Image (spheres, grey):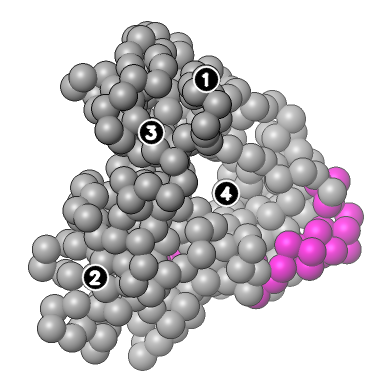
């Protein structure tokens, strides 16, 4: 009997090719398009449906706006309001795609769920793991660290051994209308809406001071939550001796503290994490732990170069081999071992 795979089809080329490859491999493929907010582009649903028709597979649209708004969107607004910079895509993968939707599809007889993520599945000592894909420029494992470990075995990533160029070529071979469609940019639930415009719907303008690292007033801002650590553009500073970068936010006093490129306040060598999640077993971790620490490769932003680091499991402290510029509280630190996605955590505190 064919294994039943539900493919999350966004309407883009990646998930369309994922569905095509699984159909060719002989799976019983069912396409699912998720409607998550009022900002969704209706063209994406039409494109996903058109691909499903070409592949001759069943296709369903699931409206999860209510569930999405009450979790991912609400969490995003709350975090920005208190001065953090959240990662809604990672939260969506945990709570929605591989959470609520996973559970829903399981009730419908799902054997596997598949997406167009650039990530790779592998088996090491009978344990299924997620690895960095062939196309490192498109690597999306950074957003997958928060998935529940026990769900990994039910997830398929058909694009793990393909480059973006190869994916577009395959789309043409299948005569898919999305073969040349541009990739979506930005946060998934915003569509073409800019993040700052979205936040302004919920967070009022609140003028405060912009200070340098010595406490000198350089200008005024209109709300600390509209800025993130490392940001350079949009600062109302007219001293003429910049550029300045956001180094810290002080929500209590409504301050933005800025610094120049070479100032130490911009850099961190050690951070504390919360909500730490591992995608490998205790047995796997025990093999690579030494003095309660794991030597890993880590990144604190999407597409940031991986840096050798040391993770202290007991204290949830990640220490980098060299200081990293502009680490944003609320963002995610994700770590790897030998191309394997070990897990990650939410950045809670900069220690030094």
Residue positioned 69% across, 55% down in the render? 14
Residue indicated by mark 1: 238
Q: Earlier in the sequence, mark 2 or mark 3?
A: 3
Res. 311 mark: 2
Residue that badge 4 annotates: 8
Q: Earlier in the sequence, mark 4 or mark 2?
A: 4
**Circles 2 and 3: CB atoms closer than 8 Å:** no
Report the residue at 39% width, 38% height from top.
259
- As measured in the structure, the alpha-carbon distance from the residue carrying label 2 to the one carrying label 1 is 41 Å
Give whichever of discs 4 and 1 has the lower sequence position. 4
Magenta span has 178?
A: yes
As helix, strand or loop, the secondary structure at mark 1 comes to loop
Q: Quadrant of residue 343?
A: bottom left
Q: Quadrant of the N terminus?
A: bottom right
Q: Which residues are magenta?
A: 152-179
Q: x and y percent of residue 66 in the render?
A: 40, 24
Instruction: Name the secondary structure under disc 4.
Output: strand
């Amino acid at each position: 009997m064919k294994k039943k795979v539900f493919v999350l089809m966004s309407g883009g080329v990646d998930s369309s090719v994922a569905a095509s490859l699984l159909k060719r491999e002989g799976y019983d493929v069912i396409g699912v398009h998720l409607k998550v907010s009022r900002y969704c582009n209706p063209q994406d649903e039409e494109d996903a449906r058109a691909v499903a028709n070409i592949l001759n597979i069943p296709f369903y649209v699931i409206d999860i706006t209510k569930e999405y708004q009450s979790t991912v969107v609400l969490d995003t607004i709350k975090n920005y309001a208190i001065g953090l910079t959240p990662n809604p895509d990672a939260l969506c993968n945990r709570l929605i795609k591989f959470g609520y939707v996973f559970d829903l599809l399981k009730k419908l007889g799902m054997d596997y769920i598949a997406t167009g993520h650039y990530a790779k599945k592998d088996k090491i000592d009978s344990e299924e793991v997620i690895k960095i894909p062939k196309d490192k420029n498109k690597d999306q494992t950074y957003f997958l660290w928060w998935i529940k470990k026990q769900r990994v075995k039910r997830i398929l990533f058909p694009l793990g051994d393909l480059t973006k160029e190869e994916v577009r070529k395959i789309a043409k071979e299948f005569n898919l209308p999305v073969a040349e469609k541009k990739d979506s940019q930005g946060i998934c639930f915003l569509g073409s809406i800019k993040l700052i415009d979205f936040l302004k719907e919920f967070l009022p303008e609140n003028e405060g001071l912009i200070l340098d690292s010595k406490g000198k007033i350089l200008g005024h801002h209109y709300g600390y939550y509209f800025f993130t650590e490392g940001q350079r553009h949009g600062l109302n500073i007219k001293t003429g001796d910049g550029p300045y970068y956001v180094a810290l936010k002080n929500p209590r006093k409504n301050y933005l503290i800025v610094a120049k490129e070479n100032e130490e306040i911009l850099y961190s060598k050690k951070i504390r994490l919360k909500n730490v999640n591992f995608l490998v077993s205790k047995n796997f971790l025990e093999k690579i732990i030494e003095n309660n620490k794991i030597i890993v490769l880590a990144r604190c932003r999407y597409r940031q170069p991986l840096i050798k680091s040391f993770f202290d499991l007991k204290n949830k402290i990640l220490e980098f081999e060299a200081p990293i510029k502009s680490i944003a509280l609320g963002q995610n630190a994700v770590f790897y071992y030998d191309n394997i996605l070990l897990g990650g955590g939410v950045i809670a505190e900069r220690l030094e």
